Amino acid sequence: MGCKALPGRRAERRRPNVIYIMTDQQRKDTLRCYGNDKAITPALDKLAAEGTLFTSCYATQPVCSPCRSSMITGLFPNATGVVENYIPLRPDLFSWPRAMGEKGYEVCYIGKWHLGDDPVPDYFDQWRGFNTGWKHFIKKEPVYALPGQSQKDANTKYTLGKNNVGRYRPDLEADYAVEFIKQNRNKPFVCWLSFYPPHTKDVPKENLALFRGKFESKDQDIYHAMVNRIDTNIKRVMETVESLGLRENTLVLFTSDHGENYPHRWNKHHKRLCYDQAANVPLIISWPGVLPEGQRIDNIISIADLAPTILDLCDQPWPETLHGQSAKRLLAGDASGRHEDIFVQNTPYTTHKKPVKGGDQSMRERCVITDRWKLILNTSRKPELYDRTSPTPDKENLYDKPESKKVIADLINRLAAWGKKTGDKITAQLIGQWQSG
């Protein structure tokens, strides 16, 4: 494992490019580099070998829009206000792409947005995608077509362009990323590439053929096939970066907004709960020659940390009011840069028909995680305490064990402090419920 000094103020080096690649609803165990020997993900495995693989990265809220709001702002969803999929991102909030654009970066967003239907944020110089939001989901409108499928002109405003109907969406998104990188090879750029799969169930037949019958269900075969197709497209993007001689000046991140709950504790929403299957997401950070290579970090990290981490690595400032903290020191092997605790939230599930009132109140949930422990408080279930070092985490609830009392008291104090810091009323309600219980 090699590492040069992490970047400081460097006048002699061109400002680094940033490529932020994400997927939708991808479990970390769909990648070979996370130990799945049935997975076929050579591009992401290579990226991990050239960088740092995080095993304990957690979504701020394991739902699409809320977690995405944390990715772009460095704030928890209860602070962004995006606590459900139909709520747009407020334009006045800080965002790291806007901060980079203000410093002269060419900033492009490609793919699924899901932070409001319109308008497109004005801080993106280029926008290659469509506003895949809640209204498109509830109307069940097709947003792209597989090869050989047709699509009505009425729906083309949700696609990547009328002339591209018939292309598999991730293929086209990768095309746009390659084009953008080539166009901006001589100036600093930010390319945010947001793939929709494996949230969907559409995948080209040639990819599905590689996985048919390999897993417990057809859905899982399809799921892994979609990941394989995305990996192929990531390879195309990275080969472009390398062929242009940009790799050593390009910071690359890969992650997902949340996981998928099969086959453990499956629920009708496929996500939302604070169990690892939904909340513990993949994270790879790579910058050869600057950041360590072949490194694995088991310390906890939050999706909210990515905004300050990117800005810190690019020598850019960020507001002290962000909830996330930079992982720059952690990447350098400095233990002082690790979290003592991180937090995951869930908000009552509501629908477009009852966007403000109503919803499933049993989904009120807050979670505090340390390197050793996880405590979950929920409106309707009894409290849950799990030992994260157990061979079967999230399965044996230790909450009622007499020896757990001191651990629980400490975790409750941590959760209360976080709730106060972030202005989260639900945390106070759950702790009050716990105290009276």
Image: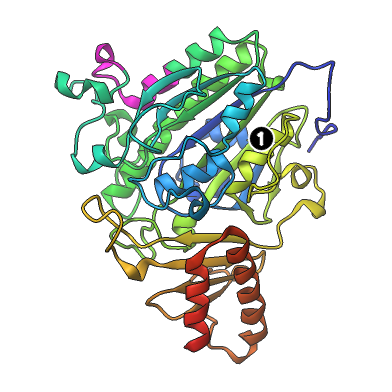
The residue carrying pointer 1 sits among few (fewer than 14), some (14 to 19) or many (20 or more) residues within 10 Å by Cα, namely: many
Region in magenta = 161-175
Q: Is residue 328 magenta?
A: no
Question: Percent from the top left, x then y, of residue 43?
Answer: 54, 30
Question: Percent from the top left, x then y, of residue 212?
Answer: 30, 42
Which residue occupies the extreme bottom position in the image?
402
Q: Main secondary structure of the magenta part?
A: helix
In this rendering, does residue 150 appear at all?
A: no
Which residue occupies the extreme front position in the image?
92
Q: Is residue 168 magenta?
A: yes
Q: State whether residue 177 is above or below residue 394.
A: above
289 or 72, which lies in front?
72
Residue at 37% over, 66% down: 363
351 or 270, which lies in front?
351
In the rendered view, does 296 fall on the left or right side of 203?
Answer: right
In the rendered view, does 344 fall on the left or right side of 266?
Answer: right
In the rendered view, does 211 fall on the left or right side of 78?
Answer: left
Provide the residue designation for mark 1. Answer: 310
Q: State whether residue 58 is above or below residue 112.
A: below
| Rendered-image quadrant of the N terminus | top right
Residue at 47% over, 42% down: 68
Amino acid marked by disc 1: Ile
Question: Percent from the top left, x then y, of residue 47?
Answer: 61, 33
5 or 346, which lies in front?
346
